[in-house]
Image: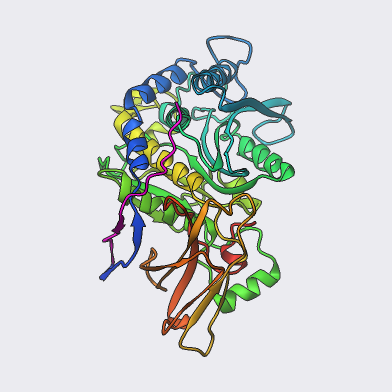
Amino acid sequence: MKFTPWALLPSAAAALFIGSVQADVDYVDQQALHDIQAAVSAQRIQQDIEKLVSFGTRHTLSETESDTRGIGAARRWIKAEFERISAECGGCLEVYYQSRVISGEPRIPDPVEVVSVIAVQKGTVDPGRYVIMSGDIDSRVTDIMNYTSDAPGANDNASGVAGTLEAARVLSKYDFAGSIVYAALAGEEQGLFGGKIMAEQAQKDGWRIKAVLNNDMIGNIEGINGVINNTTARIFAEGTRQDETPEDVRRRRFMGGEVDSPSRNVARYIDWMADRYIPNLDTMVIYRLDRFARGGHHRPFNDLGYPGVRIMETNENYNRQHQDIRVEDGIAYGDTIDGVDFDYAAKLTALNAVSLAGMAWAPSPPAQVKIAGAVSPNTTLSWAEPSAEEKDLIKGYRVYWRHTDAPNWEFSRFAGDVTEFTLENVVIDNYFFGVASVSQDGFESPVVYPGAAGAFGE
């Protein structure tokens, strides 16, 4: 059975405090998103992680013929699981392998077929618009080239794949305006190859990707720093976009946008979803592509100009990452299942699910957002007409602004179904501004900062 949340609930004040300023931001509380959060199952996530761990190793160079060991068995099980989910929703998922033979690389010297598993839930209004959730299939031990030793990869990154499968189970019960993609990507430890292959194919196929939510380690709550905390998570998001032209750089220097890339505004959107729909979870938006000098599968999408973020635990335990299984000086090393907190993994999975649903139910983020107001008491924003497909989906647009040192949007005003709106006596020099699309039901897109620096594309 399909559910579509057409009923509007009363508008509620966000009542968020940002620094010492009370946010004046209205939003429509969506019961469907509360229902999605409640539907995520820690037990199902545990079962999936246990199954992935049972394959012994999922190293990119590992066994592919066995039905019980190695990355071949793992990816076949993942594909079968997506197909089972699709069967339960009447074939609502298009499930397929995506692969390329890689060789001549430092970590893949000889030819190896890198195979990811993709499941696409097509939108009913604008199927060419996509939001993506991903996790990494592969695992490793201390020696990156050791593909025979046991590498359970329970947290890194069976947790992310299990979360992606669970999000598909929950969200496949609904219809959405835009398309949602669930991706189990391969080759991450050997060089982010699954993400590169998918991003390049998406660009070739003309996918209009509005957000990539990469989940890499979402199950650990005991940090190497001694902190045990199941109430926080991190969202990593790059600043200036990788595909800037010299002219874009020049404009940004004079108009701003260093902290308002589309990736940053996707991160702010997810942060608000945590505040509004995920009990006992506070997310930290980290103003960096990834952890210091490290990487993840969202990066290949960022490299091509697509908005992408990394969602993960706050306190990492390096004794459980990229380690041979052993006990040394009384310390247990290895990424084993006893290091995963399944309730916490479910909490971060629910955060992904409500964020994907909110963006997929909302219209596409506004295109061609522009701003004017130099040497004026007023600020005017304008944007393009919606596409013909989304004309009936859109109720209107909401204009946002915030102080330039504020982390999230502080003020908003509903502009209506227009393509230009003036904020009187709000001086352009004193704030950052943006615009979001609003559906008939009150679902909003991420906020779009004016100009190339903040553009989500057409």
Front-most of residues 245 and 94: 94
**Residue 127 in the image: x percent, y percent?**
62, 41
192 part of magenta stretch: no
**In this view, 193 is above or below 256:** above
Q: What main secondary structure does the magenta stretch of the protein show?
A: loop
Q: Is residue 449 above or below residue 333?
A: below
Q: Is residue 84 above or below residue 426?
A: above
- Residue 51 placement, left or right of 419: left
Toward which corner of the image does residue 148 lie, by quadrant? top right
Residue 310: percent from left, percent from top: 48, 46
Instruction: Work out whether 63 lies above or below 254.
Output: above
Outermost bottom residue = 375
- Inspect the magenta stretch and tell me whether residue 8 lies in it: yes
- The magenta region covers 1-18
The colour scheme is: rainbow
Image spot of residue 234 (x, y percent): 39, 48
Residue 313 sits in quarter = top left
Q: Name the residue located 61 percent from the left edge and 27 percent from the top edge.
A: 94
